[in-house]
Image (cartoon, rainbow, N blue to C red):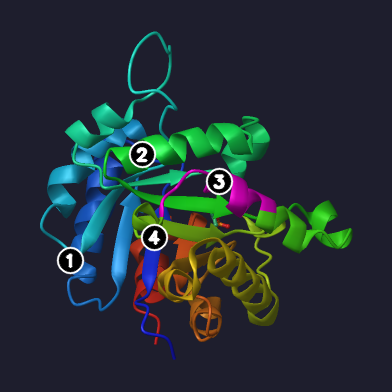
Amino acid sequence: MSNRSYYIAGNWKMHMTRAEAAKLATELAAQLKDGKHKYLAAPSFTLIETVAPIVKGTNIRLGAQNCAPEEQGAHTGEVSVLQLKDLGVQTVILGHSERRHNYKEDDALINKKVKLALKHGFEVILCIGELLEEREAGKVETVCETQTVKGLEGVSAAELANIVIAYEPVWAIGTGKTATPEDAEAVHAFVRKVIARLYGADAAEKIIIQYGGSVKPENAAQLMAKENIDGALVGGASLKPETFVPIAKFA
Ligand code: PEP
């Protein structure tokens, strides 16, 4: 058993109106009040201002799902870390597979965002993970190592304290297919070794590595029982208290 505490994050993706988000945030705040772990809700940009006062002062952190790689300027359609800070956002999810693969974000762009978010004091959840064809070609470690190393390029040892890694095998996201706890654990242990090589054993021991990919109330406890799995990044199941709360309070 490690000394790391569990961190369960909800990625609400592009769902909900303000009224729906307010309802979900209110229910989560009430039901997670006695929760023992660390929690996050990451709504769409347009919902952040609604959710912020509801989670303020609770044990649920406020997250965003992306940010621009620049502070401000002529960047039509982008949202800046300065604007996120103004709304009270504490954490930014970066490098999500939907950003990498559907919106063609590469490691260099993600790294630029990571460094900018860290510079402005945000916690960053850096998502990594392989495609199905990469897994089948035996490239899981190469892909995860590259995304970790390149995503963290130029990140200092002090800044690493504000980094959380989310291992999310792309084939398991939103598909109902979950990596077996053993398969996930093997990758988490590998990623921790990569961190040890880059930042030393102490930093590797401390860093939180979440698992993401069809986490549900039925599989959360088995995943979290693994030595190197320190929490979850939850998509679909984070949209309802009935599914998110049992994951957040897994026994
Ligand atoms: C995610 O979006 O990060 C995710 C893991 O989604 P899901 O839980 O729906 O697979």
Q: Which amino acid, by three-letter code, is at mark 3?
A: Gly
Q: Which is closer to the viewer, label 4 or label 2?
A: 2
Q: Which amino acid, by three-letter code, is at mark 1?
A: Ala
Relative to 185, is 205 on the left or the right?
left
Q: Which amino acid, by three-letter code, is at mark 2?
A: Ala
- Alpha carbon distance from label 3 to label 2: 12 Å
- Alpha carbon distance from label 3 to label 1: 35 Å
Image-quadrant location for residue 197: bottom right
Residue at 42 percent across and 27 percent down: it is 68
Mark earlier in primary sequence (3, 2): 2
Position of residue 131 relative to residue 120, above or below, is below
Circle 3 residue: 151
Q: Which is closer to the viewer, label 1 or label 2?
A: 2
Mark earlier in primary sequence (4, 2): 4
Number of other residues with Cα within 10 Å of mark 4, as a class: few under 14, some 14 to 19, many 20 or more: many
Q: Which mark is residue 30?
A: 1
The local secondary structure at tag 3 comes to: helix
Residue at 62 percent across and 30 percent down: it is 103
Mark earlier in primary sequence (1, 2): 1
Circle 4 residue: 9
**Mark 1 within 8 Å of ligand 1, using the beta carbon:** no
Q: Which is closer to the viewer, label 3 or label 1?
A: 3
Q: Which is closer to the viewer, label 1 or label 4?
A: 4
Mark earlier in primary sequence (4, 3): 4
Q: Which residues are magenta?
A: 146-156
x and y, in percent, of residue 238 in the image:
42, 58
Relative to 85, is 99 on the left or the right?
right
- Alpha carbon distance from label 4 to label 2: 18 Å
